[in-house]
Amino acid sequence: MIELVRDSLDHCVKCTICETFCPFSQVTPLFPGPKYVGPQAERYRGAGVSPDASVDYCSGCGICTQVCPQDVKIAEINSQARAQLWEERGIPLRNQLIARPSVLGRLGTPVAPLANWALKNKALRLLAHRLLGIHRRAPMPRLAGRSFQRWARQHRSPISRRRVVYFHGCGVNYYEPAVGEMVVGVLEHNGYNVQVPPQDCCGLPLQSNGNFEAARAYVRRLVANLAPYAREGVPIVVNSTSCGLMLKREAHEILGVEDDDLRAVSEATYDLCEFLLLMHERGELRTDFRPLPQTVPYHAPCQQRGHGIGKPALDLLALIPDLRVIELDADCCGIAGTYGLKKEKYEISMAVGERLFRDVWESGANLAACDSETCRWQIEHGAGVHAVHPVELLFRGYGLDAPAAAGVSAR
């Protein structure tokens, strides 16, 4: 698969459409554009020339690949080149740390109040800025102090012949367990028995930071846990659009992982909103929504668009009476996972997201919706407006946030 990605560069006709759509090359000269660092430079890398350091300023948002009329895997080529760069130069300590969210979550959860205080302390953030290179103003999520896995082990999902496996990802497990509880609540409301097997990180942050070897180990461990369900024909739903894309496509195309477990899991994996919309199209989704008189701007994150499924959240939210959803057309929020946390990239990240922040703020809403957890944290940071996963609006629309409903409270 890696060879197929690289071979796609020969289809590049230098039309520069990718350059036009790239949100990062438009705000910084440090990134000369996806065509230059992708298919153009790759021809020289094949001759053994070291990758140009500018490739590290590619965010991996994937917009270039999505808009390419010749189906050149531009973002994937860039990701592999970045891995080659850091293999030759050595991956910095900072990149090693922030690329392991499950390790940080396990360490931080028992001391969550202290960890959250440290993340807000200006002196400590300045120290991390200078010593580690993590920007002092970058948006950092708050540890919940409890894991979703712990809740799931105690929760008993109703018995049903309709089964679904939930891959929750690190964001839900350590930072937003309430989102996971709402996912389970919505699926159970629609007649599913929800199973939550033991699981760890999908390896995407490691891939994004150039550590392919460690990323492959993570993804193989994960799919080994999920594959038995996939082979039984049980669908796997993911509420994190980036983690879902990793299982569906990126582990194949970028990391080159080729085994039976990954193939089985990839074919069985659905984005949560994709899965719910397919249910609705089959006439299986419950539509007993109560009115939600509210205006909510919605941002479809880059990785969600990479699934090639449209914007299913918009169709689902349209089912809720009195809910007015504003579809935003800004391309990117700028955070790109761990990209915007880095000292040298924070200002670039904020410049990319400026239009989105302005659109959210000018909507006058006190709530925004977005499928990606890191994008939600970036929206809250840049626009000052609380951002939620679309499932929270579905959860509230079903009336599941009432005290008597499932014992699950919305945030």
Image (spheres, helix red, strand yellow):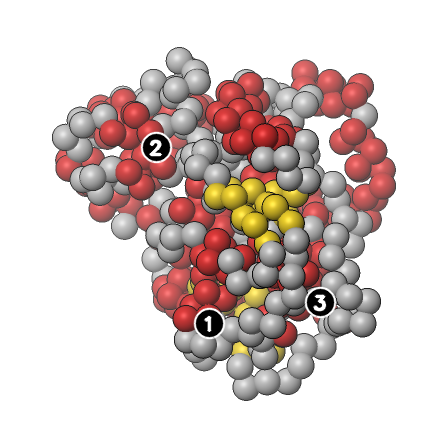
At numbered mark 1, what does the secondary structure look like: helix, strand or loop? Answer: helix
Instruction: Name the residue beneath numbered marker 1.
Output: 279
Residue 78 is tagged as: 2
**Would residue 285 appear left or right of 125 to someone viewing this image?**
left
Question: Mark 2 to mark 3: distance in Å?
Answer: 44 Å
Answer above or below: position of 219 versus 153. Answer: above
Q: Are marks 1 and 2 in contact (CB under 8 Å)?
A: no
Total numbered badges shown on the rendered structure: 3
10 Å neighbourhood of mark 3: few (<14), some, or many (≥20)?
many
At numbered mark 3, what does the secondary structure look like: helix, strand or loop? Answer: loop
Disc nearer the start of the sequence (1/2):
2
**Would residue 353 appear left or right of 61 to someone viewing this image?**
right
Res. 126 in view: yes
Q: Residue at x 40, y 62 (%)?
A: 266
Kind of residue at badge 2: Asn
Kind of residue at badge 1: Met
Kind of residue at badge 3: Leu
**Would residue 348 appear left or right of 45 to someone viewing this image?**
right
10 Å neighbourhood of mark 2: few (<14), some, or many (≥20)?
many
Instruction: Name the residue beneath numbered marker 3.
Output: 400
Q: Residue at x 64, y 85 (%)?
A: 159
Q: Position of residue 121 (x, y in %)?
A: 81, 25
Question: Mark 1 to mark 3: distance in Å?
Answer: 19 Å
Disc nearer the start of the sequence (2/3):
2
Q: Residue at x 35, y 52 (%)?
A: 308
Question: Mark 1 to mark 2: distance in Å?
Answer: 36 Å
Q: Position of residue 13 (x, y in %)?
A: 14, 30
Q: Of discs 1 and 2, which sits in the foreground?
A: 1
| 409, 106: nearer the viewer | 409
